[in-house]
Image (spheres, coloured by chain):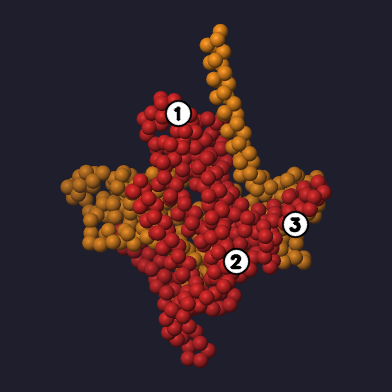
Amino acid sequence: MFLLPFLILFALFLVLPLAYAFGLSIFEERLVGGSTFVGADNYLHALRDGAFWAGIRRMVTFGVFQIPVMLGLALVFALVLDSGLVWFRSMFRLGFFLPYAVPSVVAALIWGYLYGPTFGPFTQLAHYVGVPPPNFLSESWMLASIANIVTWEFVGYNMIILYAALQAIPSELRDAGAVDGARAWQIALYIKIPLIVPALLLTCIFSIIGTLQLFNEPSILQPLARGVIIQSYTPNFYAYGLAFTNQEYNYSAAVSFAIGAVVVVGSYVFMLATNRGRISR
Amino acid sequence: MIPLGRKSTGASRLWRTKAATTALLILFLIYSLLPIYYLVVSATKDNATLFSSFGLWFASSFHAFSNLHDLFAYDNGVYVNWLWNTAYYSVSSALGAAFLSTIAGYAFAKYRFPGSTFWFAVILGSIMVPQTALVIPTYFLLSKIALIDTPLAVILPSLVSPFGVYLMRVYAEQSVPDDLLDAARVDGAGELRIFWSVAFRVLVPGFVTVLLLSFVATWNNYFLPLVVLSTPELYPLTTGLASWNALAAAGGGAHSLYPLVITGALVAVVPIIFAFLFLQRYWQGGLTFGSLKD
């Protein structure tokens, strides 16, 4: 009785769209004969689609560099705040977290203008000093520029999660290290970090999921960097373009369903792998 | 003298460590706040000074009020619509999502019924289903029932919060004692009545957490409204600002839109920052819940 309202909406807006996407993805709209069952054709098409794979590769590159940097920073800050070896703790906690409150659309807009070649302050500074201005919105810089925006948005968020996990460590365990004469960094490395592995894994999974469905930042930066962010820049952006620019609904459904499957399977495998690692240790 | 000297070097070492870590964190604090500072500074400039003055400092003339005026007047005041829509979508989605999550989480925590484990596993698994896989098919489904390009197209999908259900289940398990429910049952109260007058009161902090998280999620959502809405008057702030940004970047006469995008972005951020500052207790509870419970 209490569950029914949620389950109905859950079925309507989660299960049904998924099922429908899957249904769309195994058909093809033909000029003659309308909708035809094509089985796995759309998926095979995606497997052979260079643009789709380029997007996936871009996201993997992105994730391999951005996630460790972001989580590394978040972990270091969380440890520093937790150790108490710093002044103004609550100011840092709030200040680092503030970017998370900024909608990613607005974050991408601000950074897009900061990067900008016309009135961006970095360009202005470069002109003032007399060095060639860095073109953050060029093809070679773009991925790093987006990575910076995402890092800016989420370091504080991840830091708060890790900080809370650190605060939950029983004080006997911390004190034991201190009594043995361990330095603060030794306590951090050998006592605290192993104890917050579950929280680290959680942040890791959320980051992987977020990376694989990157959409807002490239979508906002696209008009500012014409020609650099192509329609297939990220897989998610590609699925959107396929549906609403190219009107290839069936293929778009296959692509978005494939992304969904990759995300779910990917995070599941990640959890299994890390769980097994923990048990065998 | 000597022990005293050693003691003071120990203290000064501690002082140096603290100074070093504080300096490091201050550097990152500058990085964290710089874009927000830039937004505030730029919102005081008109189009000419935006291009001619240094981006990280104020221009000689002050245009914040004229920018605000232009922002609310431009295109028949469409920005006011966006502001109102965002508030409307966020508040109704948040209330609905928090309520649905609370009753569902309560049901999972306090009742045993056939398939409860199965359903909970399905809901838990669906946390990982990316928005991409849902939004585009949702668009097709909603257009079949003529709900596309209506406020409901944004609100209805936002009501489903699997993470909220998970959160409320854990919360209900920990905070609602079974004895309390049994006592009410012995007194002859019906299940609905028990929920309303006994359980819900205890669940309020969890309810507020889910409320806040859903509010922020809807306030910041861009992909869903971008796909399901096509009438600019129905846009929320995110989609609206993005459309102005695209116009401004397209060049031509639309260049004068930049100050509006910047001022509009600032106005869009202020309420959410206040929500975070004043409700700290609740969002910290929500963000940290999942990681603590392992």
Q: Earlier in the sequence, mark 3 or mark 2?
A: 3
Location of residue B231 in the rendering, given as x and y in whole percent from the top left corner: 59, 70
Q: Colour of chain A?
A: red
Other residues around mark 3 within 10 Å, as few (<14) / some (14–19) / many (≥20) = some
Label 3 secondary element: loop
* The one of B117 and A213 positioned closer to us in this rendering: A213
* Vertical comparison of B227 with A135: above or below: below
Position of B236 with respect to A4 (left or right) is right
Identify the residue position indicated by label 3 in the image: A117
Q: Residue furthest left?
A: B186
Name the residue type under label 3.
Pro
Q: In the shown orientation, is residue A197 left or right of residue A66?
A: left
Q: Quadrant of the N terminus of chain A?
A: bottom left
Residue occupied by mark 1: A182
Q: Which disc is residue A233 wearing?
A: 2
Q: Amino acid at mark 2?
A: Tyr
